[in-house]
């Protein structure tokens, strides 16, 4: 095992503030192909942060759109055969055009059909892979203990295999959890903050995947972009939790905090 | 007509509190196949209550997932031919595996295509059927006065036919309305509470169907489980209505109340 | 160019108040075929306003439903081939039955596949066309500068071509922007109000298209119906913006204001 470094970065580190400021200036067009549970929420998260989301899902349109977008997210949460065809086209187009793209392998390892789809998509060289510990472990070839879309493993447990996955795929790997670990295999950055209530609102993790795609559209260093997106999420989540009375008001406060975060 | 009993049960009856406590302890994996209008809301409702929702909809995945889930919901609100294929597979797998499952026959009776789909699904022996009075009347073979997904009949009017439907299908039948009636044909339990504003937020009824599936995953008596889910909904709705200023804040307060309900 | 008139109408003009009052009395059944990002939000907007939304999307059901509905919306935001088939059937059925219908040509001009679908749908004589300036310009045959679903042109810039589009199609054309312009080609009515934050919540414009369909179901003059829907949106948006702390609470307050607007 090669020597690796582990650093920490949290809001308001200069890099994060700068990246968020850039995001708001450029409003990167973010092509989102995600699951039907979180489409609305994801669009609102990106708008609150300052990006410009567009959910284009038809097989006939995704290549054209992935080519002009600043970043692409592919999330397999409710993938069907029809969706998978569009995802393959989008991933190939993003790869060919040099558009940075993110894959969120929801419940990979727990269900064979989608695990195969994710494996195929990996051949199109995603810029970043974001998942919980179980999903990252599953992808890395370990035995996944996935229970639906929830993580039963802890993010730190997944770090060694996350690094290997990053080395093998060339992608940034972001393991979400109480502490997020973001690694390129050589260097790992930990992002703490956030709040456990973030796991009680559907799509918080999924929308982080989309926001990573937005940040990749304005920040060329993919490790830094992924860290910035995660850190922005953590601070908005932490602030929102402090002022909310339950899961409903947390979701509302999260969007408010994200839209008001001063860059 | 056989002799039947009619009782009432509302929060905080011991059975309800116990079932909710169990739900929070076990976080039952709930397989939700529902309409595209309410997926996000339904997931947030289940998370707020303490269950573990997963929307798995691909024909290739639903059998595997219905088999491992603690409960399954099938809601035909926006059913297409593709969806219907997956629903048939999921219902058959749930039946075969002994996973309790719920059908929500949205607008059955009002539209022929979905009525036929629902009739087919009934052959897979749902554990519970949840609908408004018009839908239950339609299913019971009476003439449905359905106007879209709204109910134009009252829940009490549907009770006699709901009992017959329960006897004929072996399912618990839950008729939602100002008062919910839940029956196994022999015994009927009325759940009052709630608030009219609950009909002004989309998906409240649909998410109750999903929550019934979650409760069925932790409480083996299906009548009791269905009553507990309904009573939890009624109290959260009633508390939320008291503190909201319109339909938007009601939806937020409903999730807050549900997530804070002390079991 | 023929002589045209330009007037302004804002809440609480008598026509608007009367139309909203009528909407709440009749709760028009509104058939919504829209994109997967905004289904939930759109249903909640229509419910808050007092209409009765129903999302029926199966090719097998849309003709039956468009025939009995009071108004129909077709929005191509995430259109696929399967959706397009259902849209063609629904538009044809609405046209044949005399049900007023609205088309929202999201991102027309920016993507060829959907532009062709929209052009085909136009042959079924929509009662109203609602879009942002870029979309209306694209439809009118001008070069669209569309960037995803956002408008890069201003609504006033699109007005001359919007009038031509209205003349050519016989539809009311509503150009959304800081000021909304609604025209039948001869007469144009400007609706001001609203707030820039309305562009930071996904689906606000899309749900206006749906609300226009609802108003068309209760007000036979289509120019007036479209103006009333737009004016109700503007006042609810303006009031909501005044009491919100960010994009999350704005969305909640918008539904609250809409549900409380006294007609």
Image (cartoon, coloured by chain):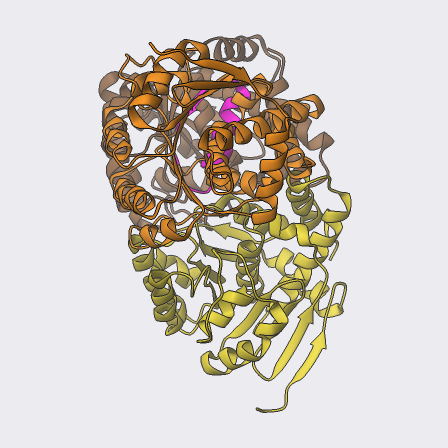
Chain colours: A brown, B yellow, C orange
Left or right of residue C3: residue B255 = right
Left or right of residue C91: residue C248 = right
- For the C terminus of chain A, the quadrant is top right
Does the magenta run of residues contain A48?
A: yes
Instruction: Return the x and y of residue B127 as percentages of the image width and height.
Output: 49, 72
Q: Residue at x 30, y 34 (%)?
A: C125
Image: B41 above or below B188: above
B232 or B63: nearer the eye?
Answer: B232
Instruction: Return the x and y of residue A111 as percentages of the image width and height.
Output: 35, 50
Image: C92 above or below A214: below
Do we see residue A156 in this rendering? no
Magenta stretch: give its range.
Answer: A34-54
Instruction: Return the x and y of residue A140 as percentages of the image width and height.
Output: 35, 37
Q: Quadrant of residue A66?
A: top left
Q: Quadrant of residue C117?
A: top left
Q: Residue at x 69, y 37 (%)?
A: C260
Left or right of residue B207: residue A174 = left
C140 or B44: nearer the eye?
Answer: C140
Farthest residue in the bottom direction?
Answer: B2
Image: C89 above or below A190: below
Do we see residue B177 in this rendering? yes
A258 or C207: nearer the eye?
Answer: C207
């Amino acid at each position: 095992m090669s020597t690796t470094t582990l650093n920490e970065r949290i809001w308001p580190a200069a890099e994060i503030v700068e990246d968020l400021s850039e995001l708001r200036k450029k409003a990167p067009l973010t092509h989102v192909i995600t699951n039907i549970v979180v489409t609305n929420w994801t669009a609102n998260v990106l708008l609150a942060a300052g990006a410009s989301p567009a959910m284009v899902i038809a097989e006939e349109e995704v290549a054209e759109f992935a080519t002009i977008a600043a970043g692409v997210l592919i999330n397999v949460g409710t993938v069907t055969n029809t969706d998978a065809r569009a995802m393959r086209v989008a991933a190939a187009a993003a790869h060919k055009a040099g558009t940075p793209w993110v894959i969120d392998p929801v419940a990979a390892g727990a269900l064979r059909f989608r695990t195969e789809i994710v494996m195929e998509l990996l051949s199109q060289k995603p810029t970043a892979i974001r998942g919980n510990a179980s999903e990252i472990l599953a992808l890395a070839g370990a035995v996944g203990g996935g229970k639906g879309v929830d993580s039963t493993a802890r993010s730190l447990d997944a770090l060694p295999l996350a690094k290997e996955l990053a080395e093998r795929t060339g992608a940034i790997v972001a393991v979400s959890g109480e502490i997020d670990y973001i690694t390129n295999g050589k260097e790992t950055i930990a992002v703490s903050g956030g709040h456990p209530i973030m796991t009680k609102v559907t799509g918080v993790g999924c929308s982080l995947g989309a926001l990573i795609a937005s940040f990749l559209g304005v920040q060329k260093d993919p490790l830094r972009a992924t860290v910035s997106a995660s850190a922005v999420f953590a601070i908005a989540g932490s602030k929102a939790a402090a002022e909310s009375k339950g899961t409903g008001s947390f979701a509302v406060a999260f969007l408010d905090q994200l839209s008001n975060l001063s860059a």
